[in-house]
Image (cartoon, helix red, strand yellow):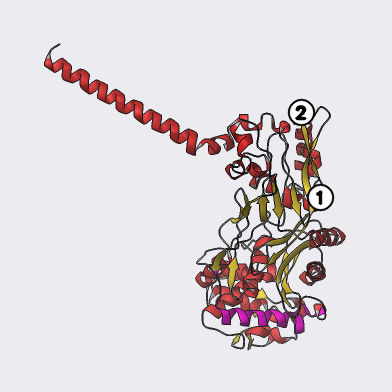
Amino acid sequence: MRPGIDRAVGRTWIVALVMIIALMVNITYVQGFEAQDLRDDSLNARQFQDRNKIDRGPIVADGERLAWSEALPGGKKYQRRYRQSPVFAPITGYFSPFSQTGLENAENHILDGTDPRLATTNLVDKLIGKHVPGGTVEATVDVKAQRAAYEALQGSGARRAAAVAIDAKTGAILVMASTPSFDANDVSVLEGERAQRAFTRLSAQPLKPLLNKASNELFPPGSTFKTVVASSALTAGGGADARVRAGRSYRPPGAGQAINNDAGDIGGECDLPAIPLIDAYAQSCNTTFAYMGAQQPGNDAVHEQAAKFGFGEPVRIESGMSGAASAFPTTDQPSLSALGSIGQGSTVATPLQMAMVAAGVLNDGKVMRPYLVSKVTASDGQEVGRGTSRQLSRALTSGQAAQMREMMEAVVQKGTGKSLRGTSVLGGKTGTADVEGASYNDRWFIGFGPRPDARYAVAVMTEASGYGIESGPIAARIIDALGD
């Protein structure tokens, strides 16, 4: 063979060898590092095959099983079961023939036995190719308080309602209740057609029972958002006793319409030209906080402060389980910023987000990432994972947080929440958001307790006629249940 041909053949062999090696590396990478992601891809229909042949582990809280699998006659198929599902559905979610939500989704691989952490505790099963049993997921939820919250929301007569309670120091979610709710037993069935009929029926209901209103539905937060605005005033150098603008009416620059205080405030402190910030907050003077959002400290300062509390980004609860992103508008129009700063207009929030605001104030200004998994264990009881407490941000200094707590306590002592004096609620903020064209309001209360050593932060939203203070007793009932 001629030398030129020899060199060409040699180069071809080298190129072919490089391509073979690259292909082997790619196959190894895909199978070794991307296999789970490919199995979980929404376009991969194979992940839904034989789902009912797996004995999934239970979801538990306070020693009670909230979800578990039950062997059907013959022992080859398993039916998922849920205890008091309308109460605990925001926690467990559902496991249907073609989807899963809540902790069923977030901890899917622990529950179905495919999580790599379980293989080390069941090595013999893994080596002989036997399916590794599913593990147990323990939730942070306080079962008694969760039931109390759901019953209180149900009894409020509200169209939609939600409540969240957080351990302010750790971020552990202790209560996450939502109404109207649904029964996961209706959709977590073996037959796909039956499940689809249930989904169709639930999806057709106008109040969306499948949607977790505590973490995934957005509402105008009303005057509870003034907590964020007051915090922005503190970070801008103000103080709880600093005198701030008030008055019966305020027209933002360039606005065609003035913002007024509530009719019930006429003749009260809010009518005065200037009052201490703590009194403006306790009496919930719209004109004060509209001015703050529109002019001083202004939209940028309020937007930055809202972001410190978690606004603007989805709230990650667990991997595969997040809350909707709350929002405060970025705008150069003072009228829009003023309206947003009293919790109306384009400002929207989830009850989870507003509980995080109250928790940040209570926890010396440190906002903790909320989480829902206390620990996960293998079928033999060995712990393979634990929920971790992590700081999300620093919204206030310790001194500023102390002033903000003083203002929230003033709401209960002498302000719009004074009907809660003597209850377990130490401090809080009421909020009433008008819903355009509707006969009902979004009635909010955020706060903390129990007194005197507050540990829990709570947010309650009930949708009905009336004012935010009407959600306050529900918050007190939840704190009472947590304290027992």
Residue under numbered circle 2: 76
Residue 407 appearing in the image: yes
Tell me which amino acid carries mark 1: Pro
Q: Which mark is residue 86?
A: 1
Q: Residues within 10 Å of mark 2 (few under 14, many from 20)?
A: few
Give the extent of the magenta segment: 394-419
Asked if residue 337 lies left or right of residue 104, the reply is: left
Work out whether residue 124 or residue 175 is closer to the camera in this orientation and state it: 124
Asked if residue 444 lies left or right of residue 110, the reply is: right
Q: How many labels sit on residues?
A: 2
Residue furthest to the front in view is: 124
- Label 2 vs 1, first from the N-terminus: 2
In this picture, is 213 found above or below 330? above
In this picture, is 439 found above or below 418? above
Q: Residues within 10 Å of mark 1 (few under 14, many from 20)?
A: many
Is residue 401 on the magenta stretch? yes
Q: Position of residue 113 (x, y in %)?
A: 65, 39
Is residue 124 on the magenta stretch? no
Report helix, strand or loop for mark 2.
Answer: loop
Report helix, strand or loop for mark 1.
Answer: helix
Q: Position of residue 142 (x, y in %)?
A: 76, 61
Q: Position of residue 164 (x, y in %)?
A: 72, 62
Q: Nearer the viewer, mark 2 or mark 1?
A: 2
Residue 283 appearing in the image: no
